[in-house]
Image (cartoon, rainbow, N blue to C red):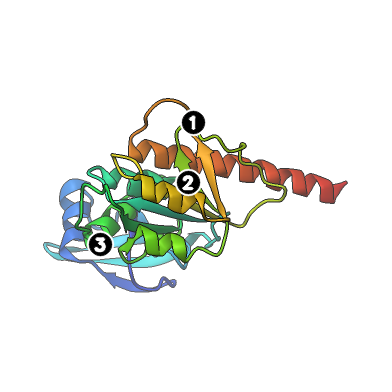
Amino acid sequence: MIRLFVSPSLLQGERLSLDSFQVHYLIHVMRLNTGDEIAIFNGKDGLWRAKLEGRKNRWILIVFELLLPQSPDPWVIHLYFSLVKRVSWILEKGSELGVTHFHPLLSERSVIRQWNEEKAMKTILEACEQSGRLTVPQILPLGHLKNCVSSMRQPFYVASISAENDPVTFSQAPEVLHVFVGPEGGWSEPEKELFQNHELCRFINLGDNVLRSETAAIASIIYLKTLAGCARRDSNSRHQD
């Protein structure tokens, strides 16, 4: 069943107007017609079944059945990323992997210096529609790396190649993860020192190969979620025993 993000609140019997982009997608791209059903979500009220009604450019959705109730994300994941050429990959894959907060950053070696939040949110919403996710990540304002790192008050993790630090381990399952990924040219020396001098910073060893920024983002999220998941299962097992 086709999934579509909508902005209004969702209740049984609601009649939702569609904008021109949604009409084009449903009618001209997906070839739907009056009476066809789709699944809709708004990031807050769960997943609902809705019926398409209308003709020409006047189309509405009638909400009539709750398919899945809203559930929270298993972890709160903050991804801090320098602007790169393939930033859409970071947004798309990060949304699919459960990132809850995207923090775009300017660093010394950022190739891209301009940020289009509207375009970024469109990429995120399409990823949520495709992946079956019911929550929608937040996009934070464009910031500067130095200011961001200086304000960190929780443990955070930085993607690195052949990091000399000990492997990351969790004695107990974290509820919140903060992950930093650098630009195409890597972190500058002053930026590396900024991380190394922060008492709450830990480096993630991603191996010896040089990774694209978007690959490093994906690898870091999967790595930390796997460790956090193992810690959570171990904690649950101890409580059951």
Which residue carries the number 1 mark? 162
Name the mark on residue 139: none
Residue at image coords 39%, 73%:
9
For the residues marked 3 and 2, what is the alpha-carbon distance in whole angstroms? 24 Å
Considering every residue shown, the one lying at the far left of the view is 56
Placement of 230 over or under 24, stated as above or below:
above
Placement of 156 over or under 45, stated as above or below:
above
Which residue carries the number 2 mark? 158
Residue at image coords 25%, 62%:
117
Considering every residue shown, the one lying at the far right of the view is 241
Picture coordinates of residue 198, whole percent (x, y)? 52, 56
Picture coordinates of residue 240, whole percent (x, y)? 84, 49
Q: Determine contact: label 3, label 1, CB under 8 Å.
A: no
Pointer 3 local density, CA inside 10 Å: few below 14, some 14–19, many at least 20: some
Q: Quadrant of residue 37?
A: bottom left
Q: Nearer the viewer, residue 44 or 214?
A: 214
For the residues marked 3 and 1, what is the alpha-carbon distance in whole angstroms? 33 Å
> Which kind of residue does numbered mark 3 sit on?
Glu
Q: Closer to the N terminus: mark 3 or mark 2?
A: 3
Which residue carries the number 3 mark? 117
> Which kind of residue does numbered mark 1 sit on?
Ser
